[in-house]
Image (cartoon, rainbow, N blue to C red):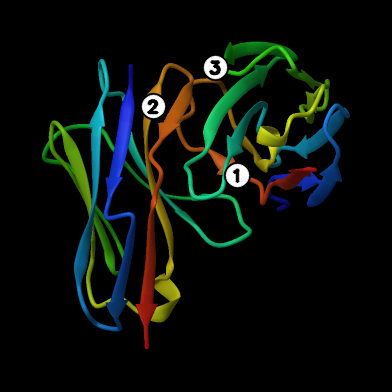
Amino acid sequence: DAGVTQSPTHLIKTRGQQVTLRCSPKSGHDTVSWYQQALGQGPQFIFQYYEEEERQRGNFPDRFSGHQFPNYSSELNVNALLLGDSALYLCASSYGTENEKLFFGSGTQLSVL
Amino acid sequence: EDQVTQSPEALRLQEGESSSLNCSYTVSGLRGLFWYRQDPGKGPEFLFTLYSAGEEKEKERLKATLTKKESFLHITAPKPEDSATYLCAVQHGQNFVFGPGTRLSVLP
């Protein structure tokens, strides 16, 4: 049973560029959440997708956007990259929006130069 | 605003030396207190959920306890493979607020 898979594992971009990160949830899960984890910090909630809609959003600017596809996979897009966007981006999946047990992928390490 | 703090920031133990990690939280209406383990280069892995003060959960060498203001993760006779960052989180609506974590190193 495949767990949560994320791609790519590592990415290097320059300031001002745009990036798309991808996530496939664990089999049987229909809800995807995205988190940003800066070095030495805990994960910070970006947003959650369920039934192809953004259900809840954390304190992140509109430069961060997402999408969920009918097969429950998801993308995270970040526009106009800033140096401060350098972080580990984690995708977590669950079944239903009220399910408290999150399964995380290994993340995408984004470096903005 | 929900807040989670953890102490110590880092902890080094000798193999077999028991200790405890602390998680303090302020939240309006606790729905659950969660502990996760995170290895370098990996995503967090779920360990425990605690719902009410006085509750305890155990898994191998780990035991989590909960009071009205904090949670403890007790590690009994740790082994080097227990080395990791331990994160706690509280549930806020449909998302989670994580603490900064405690980096645990267990030396052989």
Query: At x 26% / y 15%, what residue is drawn?
Result: B28
Residue that badge 3 annotates: A59
The answer to whether any part of residue B32 appears in the image is no
User: Residue A2 in the image: x percent, y percent?
Assistant: 73, 51
**Any mark on residue B91, and which?**
2
Query: CB atoms at circles 1 and 3 under 8 Å apart?
Result: no
Element carrying mark 1: strand
Q: Nearer the viewer, mark 2 or mark 3?
A: 3
Can you tell which quarter of the image residue B90 is in? top left
What is the three-letter code of the residue carrying label 3? Asn
Element carrying mark 3: loop
Labels 1 and 3: the sequence-earlier one:
3
What is the three-letter code of the residue carrying label 1? Phe
Query: At x 48% / y 19%, what residue is drawn?
Result: B94
Q: Nearer the viewer, mark 1 or mark 3?
A: 3
Q: What is the chain identity of the residue bearing mark 1? A: A
Residue that badge 1 annotates: A104
**Any mark on residue A113, and which?**
none
User: Residue A69 in the image: x percent, y percent?
Assistant: 83, 22
Can you tell which quarter of the image residue B9 is in? bottom left
Q: What is the chain identity of the residue bearing mark 3? A: A
User: Residue A92 in the image: x percent, y percent?
Assistant: 61, 37
